[in-house]
Amino acid sequence: MKNLVFLISIVLIFSACTNENGKIAEPESDFSGTLTENEIAGGKMTAEILWKFGRVGEVQVSPDNLTIVYSLTRYDSKTNKSTTKLYVLPVEGGEAVELSAMKSFHPRWSVDGSKIGFLSAESGSVQLWEINPDTGSPVQVSDIEGGINEFEYAPTGDRIYYTKDVKLKQTPQEIYPDLPLTDVRIIDELMYRHWNHWEDYSYSHIFVADYQNGK
């Protein structure tokens, strides 16, 4: 009887942790960085507390030197996920304001300071977006196949440079189309793998595009 009760308990626990597809349900991510009462009372810096700190990056000062825009990345150790968003803050200090609820990064001020350009994968691939800091309504600027990696405004304000990966080499499947399930890499040099990169048949290239009226 005890064994039966134990087995039923295990089944109920497993059912509670699975979704409608029968897969184990992942816990919801928590990027708030809120400390627990025990963490506050402990008075010690731990690895768990450190992971709750936001990581500030990509600080950009507005052309009039009055406002700062920066990215802030937060992590959730339970789900091993991260999220990055943008915030604006007066140079003289004050309360930081979240620029948009979208996940975004690589902020850049437009030449006249009226807009902030940034990158986001909200549309399915990483594209250039812009937002007026006063209205908080992001607008997609680019629609480049495969997405882009970074961008900058030209000092004249009428052009943008951006980088994107361009595929230049053939994969083994493309070289041997009669072997579509091939899962190999063709190596013809000794130093095929380096500590700072891994070849994926594509290379980052710089492109220049005209920029007018937010397009």
Image (cartoon, rainbow, N blue to C red):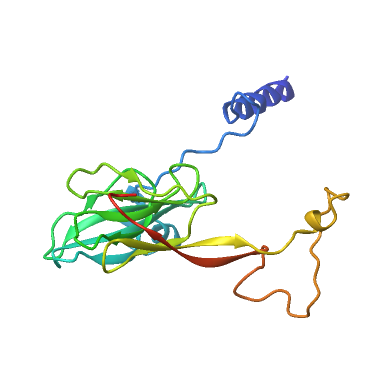
Report the number of discs: 0
Nearest the viewer among 1 and 190 is 190
Residue, x 43% and y 43% (percent of image)?
122
Residue, x 75% and y 59% (percent of image)?
171
Residue 165 in view here = yes
Residue 120 relative to residue 95: left or right:
right
Residue 45: image quadrant is: bottom left
Residue, x 33% and y 56% (percent of image)?
211
The outermost residue toward the bottom is: 190
Q: Residue 70: x and y, percent?
A: 29, 61
Quick check: 14 above or below 137? above
The outermost residue toward the top is: 1
Q: Residue 181: x and y, percent?
A: 83, 48
Q: Residue 197: x and y, percent?
A: 61, 71
Nearest the viewer among 68 and 9 is 68
Residue 49: image quadrant is: bottom left
Which image quadrant: the N terminus?
A: top right
Q: Residue 194: x and y, percent?
A: 66, 76
